[in-house]
Structure formats: structure tokens, C-alpha cells
């Protein structure tokens, strides 16, 4: 059951092919939600602190946005005031979900013209946002479904986040959960579309494919999926892309696409330096995690070998472990973070391994199927 090995990760430098879109980091991820103010409470339970705000009080008459921060992770929660606003329409169609993956770049103009020339569909051309704190430039291109990739150039901006935002004192008492950075952002696309998007990330953004998991690796008795992982030049930004594969029943990817009404971001993986502490804290805060059957833990010490953490803690908290040639990783997945069975979060700690936990896929997907069956969606 657990004999699946992590495929070798292709670490050759992208430089040979030309790293023509230099991306410094993920700047932020923006969720369009039904009620941003209330969503700040949920994210505060994940250890995120509201640090900046735009809305009626700051002169923004179109929408309210709260910037939530923890470690280097920034999540923007946005709701529209007007029911006819495209933000509201997005929410109506998809439920709460990721609208924008924002990437920080040195030169928006250059990245814009380079990506458009390479076939990207432009959504908004380079735009100057100016206030007394300087100017910030953004541009956006279309990614899978209605998801956007936004480029942000902030070297000439000293304000809280961007114009119209003001820094705020958190009205909520937040205890950090030890989450440090985004490890990867996964997209679900329709059957037969994975390779199109792999090609898109390669052609438009210069990303390279570092891993391929086929449906022989990712399947259960009932359903299957395929996944390819794309990474940028410095391999810091990783975008796995999933598509459903033929199975006897409905795969979790199909369930997502049905409830999200199309492709979109399936999960964000957030890094912690101490997963035991993080998960214990998050469980105390009421965050719900998927749990694999206890039998998983019987074989675990033999499969993974010596680790720094205690297997007792790992079992108690429902954490999963996987090992490859470079080391091991620990990971756990939340239940969907809104009513629709769509977006969820992964908490991950890497101890040498650069993989994605392939040895856990089967056990994990079987427990997802139990949840799908409970929802009447298998
Ligand atoms: Fe993941």
C-alpha cells in the first residue's frame, strides 16, 4: 500500500532555457469571499493577523479588503459592496475562492510585454497606483478558469500595502501558528487540460516541469488523478496542476470542478518549521483536518525510519509523513475552508525532502473519498 516512491525531481537550472520572467516571490494571494470581515476571524484562527485595510472608511467605495499576514505569507480577503460588481459575481459563481495569485517582480512592464508576447491573455495592462507613499505598478494575466496571475512591482512604494490601504491595529487578538511561507499553490483543471496548462506555464512564464505523477501513482479503488508540478527558475514558486483521470467513481478533482463551477486553486501549502506545534495550536483553534485510518500509523516508523519528531505526537495529531532520497517531509490537510467542498489548505514541514508526499497520496485520497461519500458526491 505504501510502496510508492517519489519520482526524481528535475533540478536542472532553467537558466539554460532563459529565465525570462524573473519572479522574486509570491506577493500575496487574494480570495474573493462573501463577507471579508467575518473571514478575517477564520484566518485569525489560522494565526493570520489583519495588518491593512481598504474600504468605505479609506475612500474605497467599491470593495472592502483585509490584508492578513503571518510570517512571509500574505492573504488578501475581499468582498464587494455592490451586488452587480464582478467581485460579487465571482463569489456567486465560485463561492469563496482564490481570485488572484500575485507575484512580486522587479519590472512589471517587462514581465507584461514578455508574457503577452508569449501568448498570455492580458486582463489589465500595467497600471500605476499612486498615493503619498509612492507608486506601485501592477498588471494581470489570465490563468486557469477565472484565476488571475497579477504582477506587482513595489520598489517605489513605502505604504502599508497599496494605495487606498491603511495600516491597522488588529482588532482581533491573534496567536501566530508558526506558518512561514507558501510552499506551493495547486490548481485543478478539467479532464484533458493538464498538459495545456503545463505548456502555458512553460511557454508564458518560463516555468519547467519538475515532477509528473501519473494516474498509476495517484489512484484508489474508485478514482484517479494526474498531476504535474511546474516551478520557476529558483524553484521557490511551485504550481502543481491536477486533472481528473478515469475511475469507477467521481474523483475529488471532479467534485471540486463541479462545486467551484470550473477550474481554480485547489489548495495552498503553507510551510511551518514545527508542524507538531503548529497543528496542535490549529486544532485547539478549531481548524478541522482530514484524518487517515489509524492503520496508516502502524506501518509508518518502518516506512519512514528515524525522524526528529515523536511518532506518538504524529499519530495523535493525524500528521502524515513521507521519505525520499533527500530526506523526509511531514504534512497534513485541512477540510475545505468554506461550505463548498473546494479550496483547502496543506500544512507542510520539509526536512530535506522536496517532494509532495507521494507515499501518502493513496491513504489520503481514500480518506477524502470517505468525506466525498458523506457529502453524497462520490
Ligand atoms: Fe500539496
Image: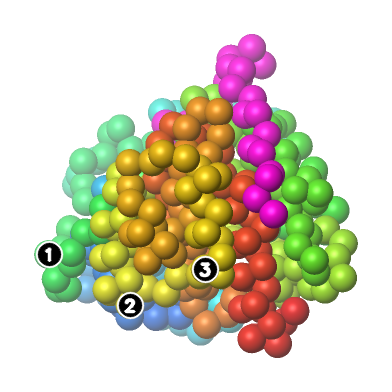
- Is residue 162 visible in this depiction of the protein? no
Q: Name the residue under label 1.
A: 169
Neighbor class of circle 1 (other Cα within 10 Å; few <14, some 14-19, many 20+) is few
The spot of residue 362 in percent (x, y) is 67, 58
Q: Does the magenta stretch include residue 376?
A: no
For mark 3, what is the residue? 294
Name the residue beneath numbered marker 2. Answer: 286
Q: Are marks 1 and 2 in contact (CB under 8 Å)?
A: no
* Residue at horizontal 30 percent and vertical 32 percent from the top: 155
Span highlighted in magenta in the image:
1-30
Residue 323 on image: x %, y %? 53, 39
Check mark 2 vs ligand 1: CB closer than 8 Å? yes or no: no
Return the disc, 1 or 3, that comes first in the chain's sequence. 1
Which dot marks residue 328? Answer: none
Q: Kindly report which numbered mark, 2 or 3, lies closer to the viewer in this rendering.
A: 3
Q: How far apart are marks 2 and 3 (CA)?
A: 21 Å
Density class for disc 2 (Cα within 10 Å; few <14, some 14-19, many ≥20) is few
Q: Where is residue 333 in the image (x, y as percent from the top left)?
A: 49, 62
Amino acid at each position: 500500500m505504501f510502496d510508492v516512491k517519489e519520482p526524481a525531481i528535475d533540478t536542472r537550472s532553467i537558466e539554460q532555457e532563459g529565465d525570462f520572467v524573473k519572479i522574486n516571490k509570491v506577493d500575496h494571494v487574494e480570495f474573493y469571499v462573501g463577507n471579508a470581515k467575518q473571514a478575517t476571524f477564520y484566518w485569525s484562527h489560522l494565526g493570520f493577523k489583519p495588518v491593512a485595510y481598504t474600504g468605505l472608511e479609506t475612500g474605497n467605495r467599491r470593495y472592502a479588503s483585509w490584508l492578513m499576514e503571518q510570517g512571509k505569507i500574505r492573504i488578501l480577503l475581499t468582498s464587494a459592496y455592490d451586488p452587480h460588481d464582478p467581485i460579487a459575481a465571482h463569489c456567486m459563481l465560485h463561492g469563496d475562492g482564490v481570485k488572484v495569485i500575485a507575484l512580486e517582480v522587479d519590472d512589471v512592464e517587462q514581465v507584461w510585454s514578455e508574457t503577452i508576447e508569449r501568448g498570455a491573455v492580458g486582463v489589465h495592462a500595467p497600471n500605476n497606483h499612486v498615493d503619498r507613499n509612492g507608486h506601485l505598478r501592477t498588471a494581470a494575466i489570465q490563468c486557469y478558469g477565472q484565476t488571475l496571475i497579477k504582477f506587482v512591482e513595489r520598489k517605489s512604494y513605502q505604504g502599508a500595502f497599496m494605495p487606498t490601504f491603511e495600516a491597522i491595529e488588529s482588532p482581533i487578538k491573534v496567536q501566530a501558528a508558526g506558518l512561514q511561507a507558501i510552499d506551493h499553490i495547486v490548481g485543478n483543471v478539467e479532464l484533458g487540460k493538464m498538459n495545456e496548462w503545463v505548456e502555458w506555464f512553460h511557454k508564458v512564464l518560463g516555468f519547467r516541469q519538475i515532477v509528473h505523477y501519473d494516474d498509476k501513482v495517484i489512484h484508489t479503488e474508485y478514482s484517479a488523478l494526474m498531476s504535474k508540478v511546474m516551478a520557476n527558475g529558483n524553484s521557490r514558486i511551485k504550481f502543481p496542476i491536477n486533472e481528473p483521470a478515469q475511475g469507477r467513481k467521481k474523483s475529488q478533482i471532479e467534485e471540486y470542478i463541479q462545486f467551484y463551477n470550473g477550474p481554480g486553486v485547489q489548495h495552498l501549502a503553507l510551510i511551518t518549521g514545527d508542524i507538531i506545534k503548529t497543528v496542535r495550536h490549529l486544532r485547539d483553534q478549531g481548524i478541522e483536518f482530514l484524518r487517515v485510518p489509524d492503520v496508516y500509523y502502524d506501518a509508518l516508523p518502518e516506512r519512514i525510519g528515524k525522524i526528529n519528531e515523536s511518532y506518538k505526537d504524529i499519530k495523535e495529531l493525524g500528521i502524515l509523513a513521507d521519505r525520499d532520497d533527500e530526506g523526509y517531509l511531514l504534512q497534513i490537510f485541512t477540510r475545505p475552508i468554506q461550505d463548498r467542498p473546494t479550496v483547502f489548505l496543506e500544512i507542510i514541514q520539509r526536512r530535506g525532502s522536496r517532494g509532495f508526499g507521494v507515499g501518502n497520496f493513496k491513504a489520503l485520497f481514500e480518506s477524502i473519498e470517505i468525506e466525498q461519500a458523506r457529502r453524497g458526491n462520490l
